[in-house]
Amino acid sequence: GQFNEQAVTSFGRLLAQENRDDETDGVKEPAEFKAGSKWKAFKEGSLAFFNTTLGMDRVPYSYVVRDQDDPDDPQAAYETEHARLIAITPHAGLEFEADNGRVFDYLKSWTLNGPAWTWIRTYNRARNGRAAWLALVQHYEGDDQKDRVKDAAYEAIAQARYFGNRKRFSFETYVTIHQEAY
């Protein structure tokens, strides 16, 4: 049957992991998103937070903001149970509605005092976190934005000069400017 010794052991490990997860605080929320130039850090911080914050069915909120609309095949091979849950959880039902609303509430609280609120406020009444997230991604990663980011990166590299270690500008700072430009 399906409940062989390996399945039982795997389920036991999963339950133990869930108990450990309950004992941790996870990742802290990203800082308020007040400048479009900080999109990359905001996006990565949001994804890290959503990956460690569990929704209604103890599935990380990141399933709400995953790239694909339709759930993947539950029988496919996944690197981890965490990745499987994110990939296979459907965007439908009462649990999704609750999680989707909660994701919107987080996004609203992080963007309300900045320019990003303009791009998601139309989803406020429905509390549609998925649509809000996709609108942010489209705006900050669309073709026009890519051109602006590329221009800003070239400008940062052109302006970066290293004249030896100074009080507020070390070689590490200089290298960081170049790394962030890519």
Image (cartoon, rainbow, N blue to C red):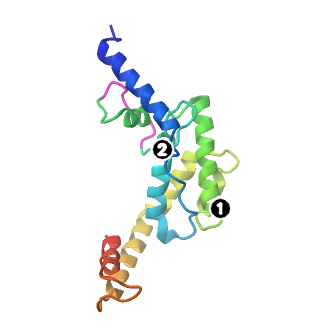
Residue 102 on the magenta segment: no
Amino acid type at mark 2: Thr
Please state which of the two labelled residues, at mark 1 or mark 2, is closer to the viewer: 2
Dot 1: element: loop
Circle 1 Cα neighbour tier, 10 Å, few/some/many (<14 / 14–19 / ≥20): some
Circle 2 residues within 10 Å: few <14, some 14–19, many ≥20:
some
- Measuring from the top left, give residue 9's x and y in whole percent: 34, 19
Q: Amino acid at mark 1?
A: Leu
Q: Determine if residue 46 is in view.
A: yes
In the picture provided, is 78 more to the left or to the right than 36? left
For residue 39, side relative to residue 83 (left or right): right
**Looking at the picture, does residue 130 appear above or below residue 44?**
above
Q: How many marks?
A: 2
Give the x, y percent position of residue 49: 50, 50
Number of the label disc, if any, that sits on residue 52 = 2
Q: Give the CA distance from mark 1 to mark 2.
A: 23 Å
Q: Is 130 located above or below residue 14 in the figure? A: below
Q: Nearer the viewer, residue 1 or 98?
A: 1
Position of the C terminus by quadrant: bottom left
Residue 149: give x, y in percent of width and height.
40, 72
Residue at 58%, 29% in the rendered image: 93
Q: Is residue 89 visible?
A: no
Query: Considering the image in quadrants, where does the N terminus appear?
Result: top left
> Nearest the camera: 166 or 42?
166
| Above or below for 67 versus 135 | above
Specify start and end residues of the magenta stretch as a single range. Answer: 68-76
Left or right of 33 on screen, residue 73: left
Q: Earlier in the sequence, mark 1 or mark 2?
A: 2
Who's the residue at 61% across and 56% down the image? 120
Residue farthest along the right direction in this orientation: 125
Q: Secondary structure at mark 2?
A: helix
To which residue does mark 1 refer? 112
